Image (spheres, coloured by chain):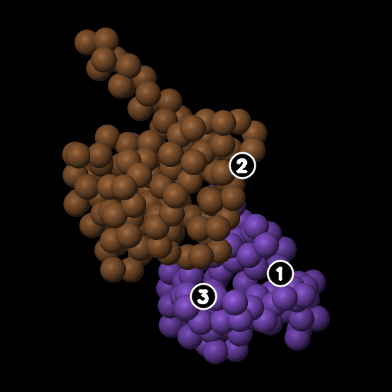
């Protein structure tokens, strides 16, 4: 069996909904929900695939370095992340 | 569309944005893409379409990717590319999988794996025909 060799893609959106951040603290790192947003990988630490997410663009981050306890709403803390214009995603 | 490959690819993925992304990319690569949103639908689509290759998410509702692999058994010669973030390739031991690609994957990596798997499958079929 072949395995993909080389670096995996980075996470470029995180779900920063308050409820999902809180729920994600009880979920092991890496066991949340991965999806695609605007052609880029997005991650919800709560793993709630069927609920609306509040996506926030972040600097490209390797998936292995995403830690649930460190996910926060960057725009509320003056960090360099930027809210996506359509971050209130109610389409899913 | 870059090329007309005329190879049928079944994408079995329950996450709609990921499925749409894969369909667009593989269609652009020239594959004839069909989709399934869960493992049961994947079995049905596989029987209808007889795809040349399957991109299979392992975490799906109703019937997951592992059960899909167990049920399709040896009757499908098409290579299966398993994709997952939650599982590791070691957990696929003994199941008919051509390749494993971990999420989040680089699209170009996945497309390369698909092309190589189809190439290897084509070579194997040619060898069998010659023998």
Alpha carbon separation for disc pair 2 and 1: 26 Å
Q: In which quarter of the image is residue B60?
A: bottom left
Q: Mark 1 lies on which chain?
A: A
> Badge 2 local density, few (<14 within 10 Å), some, or many (20+)?
some
Of the numbered discs 3 and 1, the one sitting upstream in the chain is: 3
The residue at which mark 1 appears reads as A57
Could you say which quadrant of the image residue B85 lies in?
Answer: bottom left
* Quadrant that contains the C terminus of chain A: bottom right
The answer to whether marks 2 and 1 sit on the same chain is no
Colour displayed for chain A in the image of the structure: purple
User: Crowdedness of circle 3 by 10 Å Cα count: few (<14), some, many (20+)?
Assistant: many
The location of residue A6, given as percent across then percent down, is 54, 41
Residue A74, position as x, y percentages in the image: 72, 79
Residue under the image location 72 percent in, 63 percent down: A59
Q: Can residue B63 be seen in this view?
A: yes
Mark 3 vs mark 2, foreground winner is: 2
Q: Chain for mark 3?
A: A
The residue where tag 2 is placed is B28
**Residue occupying the far front of the picture:** B48
- Where residue A75 appears, as percent x and y from the top left, is 76, 81
Please state, as top left, top right, bottom left or bottom right, where the N terminus of chain A lies in the image. top left
Instruction: State yes or no: discs 2 and 1 in contact (Cβ < 8 Å).
Output: no
């Amino acid at each position: 069996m072949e395995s993909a060799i080389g670096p995996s893609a980075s996470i470029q959106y995180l779900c920063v909904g308050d409820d999902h951040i809180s729920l994600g603290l009880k979920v092991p790192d890496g066991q949340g929900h991965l999806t695609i947003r605007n052609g880029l990988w997005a991650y919800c630490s709560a793993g709630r695939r069927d609920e609306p997410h509040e996506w926030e663009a972040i600097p490209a981050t390797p998936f292995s370095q995403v830690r649930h306890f460190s996910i926060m709403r960057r725009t509320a803390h003056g960090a360099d992340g930027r809210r996506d214009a359509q971050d209130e995603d109610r389409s899913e | 569309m870059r090329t007309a490959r005329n190879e049928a690819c079944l994408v079995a993925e329950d996450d709609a944005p990921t499925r749409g992304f894969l369909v667009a990319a593989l269609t652009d690569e020239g594959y004839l893409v069909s989709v399934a949103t869960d493992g049961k639908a994947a079995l049905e689509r596989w029987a209808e379409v007889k795809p040349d290759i399957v991109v299979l998410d392992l975490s799906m509702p109703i019937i997951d990717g592992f059960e899909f692999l167990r049920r399709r058994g040896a009757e499908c010669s098409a290579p299966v590319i398993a994709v997952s973030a939650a599982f590791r390739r070691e957990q696929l031991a003994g199941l008919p999988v051509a390749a494993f690609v971990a999420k989040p994957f680089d699209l170009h990596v996945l497309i390369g794996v698909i092309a190589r798997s189809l190439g290897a499958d084509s070579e194997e079929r040619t060898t069998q025909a010659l023998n």
